[in-house]
């Protein structure tokens, strides 16, 4: 690996520490509602492990076996951090966010610097790659505020490590292979994308850069075995806690699945259409430009072809998983439920685009060495614009007024940004429920209240998604109950139905509910049934 001067190394470390510390300070008073819905599903799992007596009548946490399959590395890491935050899981996520911000910024810089022979280009793109990008399947790339600190963010923060370890030594290749398998355990869906990227990169680089001795069939087999060894913890947990055996009505399951998961997850062409957006050009255009610009340079052109092929592979192979799974289920009478997750692997297809940008910028500088002296000023100007990216002045400016720019810096490092929201009514209501109800009480309420109050919640759709793989029969039961409650045309009938499930409190924005009004926060009311 190329050497970096102590001064430049210090710049990278200090810059990323500043961002990490600023985000941490900005979130010291964060509320539960500021977390993503995925984390609001995960925190109750950690709470259930902490205290098995919680959530006895919950939609998906009544039995811990329903969720043992779910990202155990992330859950257990979060539980460990929570021991230092007095089991305040919002602050545990905040601490994890600090770790991820430092790790993400430093590791992606070094990976870019390994392949791009210019400090300032690597630094600039390592900042750019932080920005939040919205991708098909409700996926995101990037790292920003508290709501982005999910299992996938931990994974992509660590993703550069295996690639940094790679060298011509086959023992290093095997070590990297084990590591790409091991970090997969933090988020298996994104992890499969990382493994596909890693294996494809090894094969293509061996072909294009004449390193075929590294990738004989024997060596490929050893790499795959080593990757699989790293994946073992999740694989054993997942297949030990989920079953593809059909002991329920496939028709009823599919109805429930369609009610919870958008149809395009099972329709590859519809999913692929989501890539046909203007913002996709940000990742596709640099691949094309680099391919054209490098045409007369054999080494550079091979790099361009490698990046293009990686992008195609990372989009097409996850797409193929859908018809393959459907065929297997039909032939073997199974109900495998993986492809709706596997198709989301496409998110890692944005990575080659970032490297294409880096190679283009490197080429621009190398064609005229005098341009090198302007590189620090370009990076400095970019950082100044980021400071103002949350202001009304840049709100409508393409690129700088969009999430990929305005999510890089926290509010406290941004000039003229809108202040963070004050405590919401939903957070105040959760605190009231915590203080004034029993831990065994059952709520009919938004999924947010489950972790925020440590109370059982029934009927919520977000929580139901945890049952798709963990307990399909219970998932079907959720759908039937949801159909029933949706068919009721008056609040009295709804209240009577909730009482059948021993619901103690109804949290709703509806008015004139035939029950005892206990408390109100904003437009939210708490009724005792």
Image (cartoon, rainbow, N blue to C red):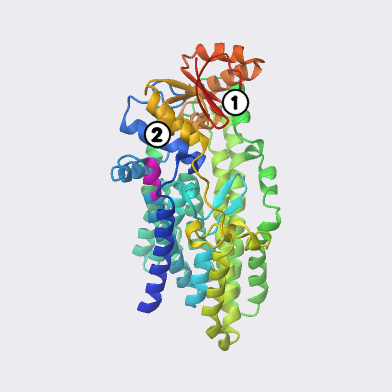
State the SS at label 2: helix
Q: Nearer the viewer, residue 423 or 120?
A: 423
Asked whether residue 92 is drawn in magenta, I would say yes
Location of residue 31 (image quadrant)? top left
Q: Is residue 338 above or below residue 216?
A: above
Count neighbours of disc 1 (C-alpha within 10 A) and say few if under 14, some if 14 to 19, many if 20 or more: many
Label disc, if present, on residue 45 of the rendered structure: 2
What's the magenta bit mostly, secondary-structure-wise? helix
Residue 451 in percent (x, y) is at 42, 33
The span picked out in magenta is 89-94
Residue 315 in percent (x, y) is at 61, 52
Q: Nearer the viewer, residue 455 or 238?
A: 455
Can I make out residue 459 in this image? no
* Residue at the extreme bottom: 370
Label disc, if present, on residue 25 of the rendered structure: none
Can I make out residue 499 in this image? yes
Label disc, if present, on residue 256 of the rendered structure: 1
Location of the N terminus (image quadrant): bottom left
Residue 109 in percent (x, y) is at 45, 67
């Amino acid at each position: 690996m190329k050497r970096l001067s102590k001064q430049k190394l210090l710049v990278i470390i200090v810059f990323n520490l500043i961002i990490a510390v600023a985000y941490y300070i900005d979130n010291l008073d964060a509320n539960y509602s500021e977390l993503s819905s995925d984390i609001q599903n995960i925190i109750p799992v950690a709470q259930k492990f902490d205290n098995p007596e919680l959530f006895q009548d919950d939609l998906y946490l009544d039995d811990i076996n329903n969720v043992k399959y779910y990202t155990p590395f992330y859950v257990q890491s979060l539980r460990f951090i929570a021991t230092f935050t007095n089991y305040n899981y919002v602050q545990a996520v905040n601490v994890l966010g600090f770790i991820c911000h430092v790790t993400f910024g430093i590791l992606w810089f070094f990976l870019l610097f390994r392949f791009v022979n210019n400090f300032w280009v690597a630094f600039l793109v390592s900042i750019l790659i932080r920005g939040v990008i919205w991708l098909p399947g409700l996926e995101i790339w990037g790292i920003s505020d508290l709501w982005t600190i999910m299992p996938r963010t931990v994974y992509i923060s660590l993703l550069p490590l295996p690639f940094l370890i790679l060298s011509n030594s086959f023992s290093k290749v095997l070590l990297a292979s084990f590591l790409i398998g091991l970090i997969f355990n933090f988020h298996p869906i994104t992890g499969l994308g990382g493994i596909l990227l890693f294996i494809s990169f090894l094969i293509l680089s061996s072909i294009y850069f004449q390193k075929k001795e590294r990738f004989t069939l024997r060596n490929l087999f050893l790499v795959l075995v080593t990757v699989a060894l790293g994946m073992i913890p999740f694989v054993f947990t997942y297949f030990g806690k989920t079953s593809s055996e059909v002991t329920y009505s496939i028709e009823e399951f599919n109805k429930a699945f369609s009610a919870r998961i958008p149809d395009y997850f099972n329709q590859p062409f519809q999913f692929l259409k989501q890539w046909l957006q203007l913002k996709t050009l940000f990742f596709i255009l640099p691949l094309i430009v680099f391919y054209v610009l490098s045409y007369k340079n054999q080494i550079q052109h091979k790099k361009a072809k490698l990046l293009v092929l990686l992008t195609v592979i990372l989009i097409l192979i996850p797409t193929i998983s859908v018809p393959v799974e459907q065929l297997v289920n039909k032939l073997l009478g199974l109900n495998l439920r993986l492809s709706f997750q596997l198709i989301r692997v496409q998110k890692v297809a944005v990575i080659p685009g970032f490297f294409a940008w880096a190679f283009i910028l490197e080429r621009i500088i190398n064609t005229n060495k005098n341009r090198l002296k302007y590189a620090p000023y370009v990076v400095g100007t970019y950082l100044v614009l980021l400071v103002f990216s949350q202001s009304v002045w840049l709100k409508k400016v393409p690129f700088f007024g969009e999430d990929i720019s305005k999510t890089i810096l926290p509010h406290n490092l941004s000039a003229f940004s809108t202040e963070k929201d004050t405590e919401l009514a939903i957070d105040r209501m959760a605190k009231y429920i915590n203080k004034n109800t029993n831990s065994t009480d059952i709520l009919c309420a938004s999924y947010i209240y489950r972790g925020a109050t440590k109370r059982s919640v029934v009927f919520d759709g977000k929580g139901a998604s945890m049952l798709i793989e963990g307990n399909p029969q219970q998932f079907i039961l959720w759908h039937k109950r949801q159909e029933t409650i949706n068919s009721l045309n008056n609040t009295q009938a709804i209240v009577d139905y909730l009482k059948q499930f021993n619901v103690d409190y109804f949290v709703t924005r509806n008015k004139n509910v035939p029950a005892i009004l206990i408390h109100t926060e904003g437009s939210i009311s708490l009724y005792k049934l």
